[in-house]
């Protein structure tokens, strides 16, 4: 586990984009391919905006999603819709290498289909993750049965963050990856971060060996 503190979300996003680019280049140089898992929510958007301007080996990238919201294809609230707008529609990644979650089909069938895809794929090279104010990550929420589901992709019900139904990569897939980069910004996250640093096992705390990137506001600094 490593921690880095940044003055602002913009500084954090610039570092994160550079780190992702570095790890992508390395994976492609070593294996000819890189499997990158994108985070949802709003925090990663700045990073994606910067990434698309970088000379990555886009044709050698496979894109996966850490979680998705069970909404119709193209819905503005879907994580893949955000990723398309901020990154994917601006870079030459072959469509067949963008592995979306079929969350529109509902949690069970989408999770089963994605788990089958993941089982046939190599371990992920890079996983990007955000954190919610309750310490959730991907769609792994406190006290939710999805936390103990050992499948590579898991159905999620009763999410406290709308929509209630989601699909998430499980810990088994997230923790098998080579690198996990956790991006946490904003004062709304300070309470959860303080609880985790005090040893509370909030869902994101079960992410193994993460590279934690946090801004001053998330660390509770007011100055
Ligand atoms: C989602 C996300 C979720 C997100 C956190 C943080 O679908 O909502 O995958 O895990 O990363 O809720 O969200 P923000 O970045 O918007 O604060």
Image (cartoon, rainbow, N blue to C red):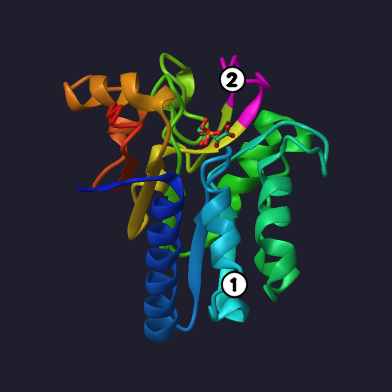
Q: Quadrant of residue 50?
A: bottom right
Residue at image coords 17%, 22%:
199
Q: Residues within 10 Å of mark 2 (few under 14, many from 20)?
A: some
So how many labels did they put on this image? 2
Q: Nearer the viewer, mark 1 or mark 2?
A: 1
Report the magenta residues as a range: 156-166
> In the displayed image of the protein, which residue is found farthest to the front?
223
Position of residue 201 relative to residue 13, above or below, is above
- Main secondary structure type of the part rendered in magenta: loop
Mark 2 close to ligand 1, CB under 8 Å:
yes
Residue marked by disc 1:
53
Position of residue 168 relative to residue 49, above or below, is above
**129 within the magenta span:** no
Left or right, 106 with respect to 50, comes to right
| Residue 22 percent across, percent down from the top left | 38, 73
Residue at image coords 16%, 21%:
198
Q: Residues within 10 Å of mark 1 (few under 14, many from 20)?
A: few
Of residues 179 and 223, which is closer to you in this image?
A: 223
| Residue 134 percent across, percent down from the top left | 42, 19
Position of residue 96 relative to residue 188, above or below, is below
Disc 2 element = loop
The CA span between labels 1 and 2 is 31 Å
Asked whether residue 30 is in view, the answer is yes
Disc 1 element = loop
| Residue 12 percent across, percent down from the top left | 39, 52
Which numbered dot is residue 161?
A: 2
């Amino acid at each position: 586990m490593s921690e880095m503190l940044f003055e602002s979300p913009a500084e954090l996003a610039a570092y994160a984009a550079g780190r992702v680019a570095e790890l992508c280049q390395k994976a492609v140089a070593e294996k000819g391919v890189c499997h990158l898992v994108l985070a949802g929510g709003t925090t990663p958007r700045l990073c994606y905006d910067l990434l698309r301007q970088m000379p990555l080996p886009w044709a050698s990238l496979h894109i996966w999603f850490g979680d998705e919201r069970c909404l119709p294809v193209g819905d503005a609230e879907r994580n893949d819709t955000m990723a398309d707008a901020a990154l994917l529609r601006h870079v030459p990644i072959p469509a067949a290498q963008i592995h979306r979650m079929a969350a529109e089909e509902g949690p069970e069938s989408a999770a089963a289909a994605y788990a089958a895809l993941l089982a046939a794929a190599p371990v992920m090279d890079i996983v990007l993750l955000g954190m919610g104010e309750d310490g959730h990550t991907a769609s792994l929420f406190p006290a939710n049965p999805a936390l103990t589901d050992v499948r590579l992709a898991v159905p999620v019900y009763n999410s406290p963050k709308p929509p209630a139904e989601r699909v998430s990569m499980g810990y088994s897939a997230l923790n098998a990856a080579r690198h996990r980069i956790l991006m946490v910004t904003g004062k709304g996250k300070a309470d959860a971060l303080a609880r985790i640093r005090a040893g509370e096992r909030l869902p994101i705390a079960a992410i193994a060996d993460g590279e934690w990137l946090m801004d001053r506001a998330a660390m509770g600094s007011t100055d």
